[in-house]
Amino acid sequence: MTPKSLLRHKRAVSRLDELANGTSFHRLLWDDAQSLPNEKIKLVADDKIRRVIMCTGKVYYDLYEEREKRGINDVYLLRMEQLYPFPARALIQELSRFAQAEMEWCQEEPKNMGAWSFIEPNLSWVLEHIDAKHKRPRYAGRPSSAATATGLMSKHTRELKAFLDEALS
């Protein structure tokens, strides 16, 4: 389900050529700062990337805007559009470009409710396979919780800021 906040979001769009004949579904979506020509942030070379943050859904846009606001150019954002079956082959191909970088999974959901428990062992296997410098992915997101949402906008905003800080620091 797509949150309503993305309904008219300026970045949540596709170009017409991406929907034409000869195109296909991508299990991974690359960082817009690298693939779109007029972005404010120009990423450093692959071997200079310090961290790769993997995520799915709306949190990508939160991370992208925060990275842009901070002027960070050595953090690569990689979206997973398919979690199951796990896109191991696609990740091996993509993450081998960044074997020296720290790998991180970021999600907006609490740790015990999002994809982390599924992603962590699978992503660890991929990192071992590509002989990554960091064999275990980090987690950035809300702590485990009994409730899916806080119910208070002020607390939600504080938690969002906290995990964006953790992800991008």
Image: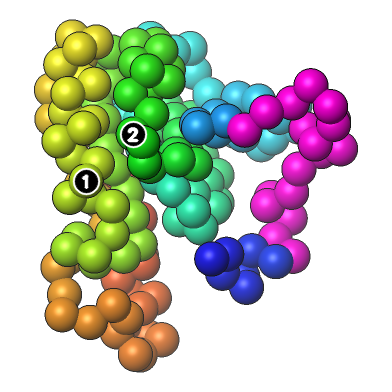
10 Å crowding of disc 1: few (<14), some (14-19), many (20+) = few
Q: Nearer the viewer, residue 5 or 64?
A: 5
| Disc on the earlier residue, 1 or 2 | 2
Q: Is residue 78 visible?
A: yes
Asked whether 1 falls inside the magenta stretch, the response is: no
Q: Are marks 1 and 2 in contact (CB under 8 Å)?
A: yes
Q: Nearer the viewer, residue 116 or 74?
A: 116
Task: Check the image and name the residue furthest to the bottom.
Answer: 152
Q: Amino acid at mark 2?
A: Phe
Q: Quadrant location of the C terminus?
A: top left
Q: Say whether residue 6 is left or right of residue 125.
A: right
Q: Say whether residue 50 is left or right of residue 15.
A: left
Q: On the image, numbered disc 2 is attached to which residue?
A: 86
> In the image, which residues are magenta?
8-25
- Which residue shows up at 49% across the image and 53% down it? 57
Q: Is residue 138 above or below residue 65?
A: above
> Toward which corner of the image does residue 36 lie, by quadrant?
top right
- Which residue shows up at 17% across the image and 50% down it? 117
- Rendered image: mark on residue 74: none
Q: Position of residue 158 (x, y in %)?
A: 32, 74
Tell me the element at label 2: loop
- Which residue shows up at 31% across the image and 65% down it? 109
- Rendered image: mark on residue 118: 1
Q: Nearer the viewer, residue 70 or 6?
A: 6
Q: Position of residue 10 (x, y in %)?
A: 74, 55
